[in-house]
Image (spheres, rainbow, N blue to C red):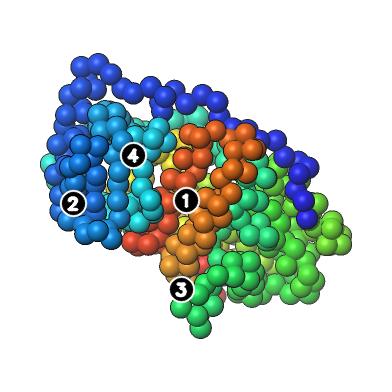
Amino acid sequence: MSIQSHVTARPSTSWPDVEHVPTGTRATIAAALADRLFRRAVRTLPIRVEYPDGTVLGRGGADAPRLILHRPADFTARLGVGGLIGFGESYMAGDWSSPDPAATLTVFAARIDRLVPAPLRALRRLYVSKHPATEHNSESNSRSNIARHYDLSNNLFELFLDETLTYSSALFPATAPPPRWADLAAAQQAKIDRILDRAGVGPGTRLLEIGTGWGELALRAAARGASVRSVTLSTEQRALALDRIAAAGLSERVTIDLLDYRRVTGEFDAVVSVEMIEAVGYEYLDTFFETIDRVLAPGGRAVIQAITMPHHRMRATRDTYTWVHKYIFPGGFLPSTRLLADVAARRTELVVREQLSMGEHYAHTLRLWQQRFNARADRVAELGFDPIFRRMWRLYLAHAEAGFRCGYLDVHQILLTRAA
């Protein structure tokens, strides 16, 4: 099915923090310190950092991940002034590159707690940026936060997702080793089917979906005979999802509302939400679980698929404004499974009954997305997305893969029911 309708490419044409290298006394001092710390850190890593003058740092051999510095002075200036945000912006600017950014970033992510000396880590709160108030996930801000990512262009997402247009971790067969995980569409459908099975969705089920995506879960639930209400804040996703549902002849079974989850009313036998909780925000997790508890019928089941972090890392970074927040997911927050269970128990009658860890599956999903995106870079350009955007998107996918590869990130399917 073509998705040319409902599409307006919205590439950025102004990148002030990428196009301009920090200058001045502060930047000079910060760059010198950053250069010293960076060189100190990479000397012991299984990586090759290659400088224009032929200098190579790191303990990696010929087959090790490579970070190629094209403009070392600009790189250290951005890193010194902007920290990890500057590190990402330096890639967007072309100050450094890598044949395999995910492999390179995995080396750093696996040692994130040791890259900066302990005395400087203790001062973290003094120099990291805070989240802008305009990106907190209040009802007034959430729609714009969602639009900045999900309403970029349906065509863009079509270029690297599979035909199900599913933008979350797939679940590959347990009987096949990861190198043979090639059928992404089947793995996405397997993931959805497992969620629907755990939620007990079948003929006559009244199902609420929080976060529509492009409609694949609603389609599969309706095909089982369920009555589906799905809510989303993305106008582009809703338009295409409605088209797909109509084309499947399931419009009488599915309603998709452009509505904040906090505004949902009614009673449902099952509630599902796939990788939407990351857009809820720490301050609103109570409200999210209270909403599920309020609309879930007696004996109902809720299943959430959530990207998670280890609890200690979540606590350490909860208030940090990152490159991902600035350029990819404004207002995003990754919880720990412990936090989700604690909030549910404290604010509702919901209890976690089952958890499935799928981090390895997400790493492979992201690898397949990157392969498709890179292979279709010319078509991304034809949509109007400039070179800085294309480098940004490559880094985003690689950054995410690295997190799952090294265990810094995980993804869980979580089943909740009310306490007996």
Q: Looking at the picture, which amino acid does disc 2 mark? A: Gly
Q: Secondary structure at mark 4?
A: strand
| Vertical comparison of 156 with 16: above or below | below
Task: Identify the mark nearer the N-term, 4 or 3.
Answer: 4
Q: Residues within 10 Å of mark 4 (few under 14, many from 20)?
A: many
Q: How many discs appear?
A: 4
Q: CA distance from mark 1 to mark 2?
A: 24 Å
Q: CA distance from mark 4 to mark 2?
A: 16 Å
Task: Identify the mark nearer the N-term, 4 or 2.
Answer: 2
Residue 397 as seen in the image, left or right of residue 12: left
Q: Residues within 10 Å of mark 1 (few under 14, many from 20)?
A: some
Q: Which mark is residue 397?
A: 1
- Which residue is under mark 2? 58
Looking at this view, is 207 or 63 the one in front? Answer: 63
- Residue sitting at 15 percent across and 53 percent down? 44
- Which residue is under mark 3? 178
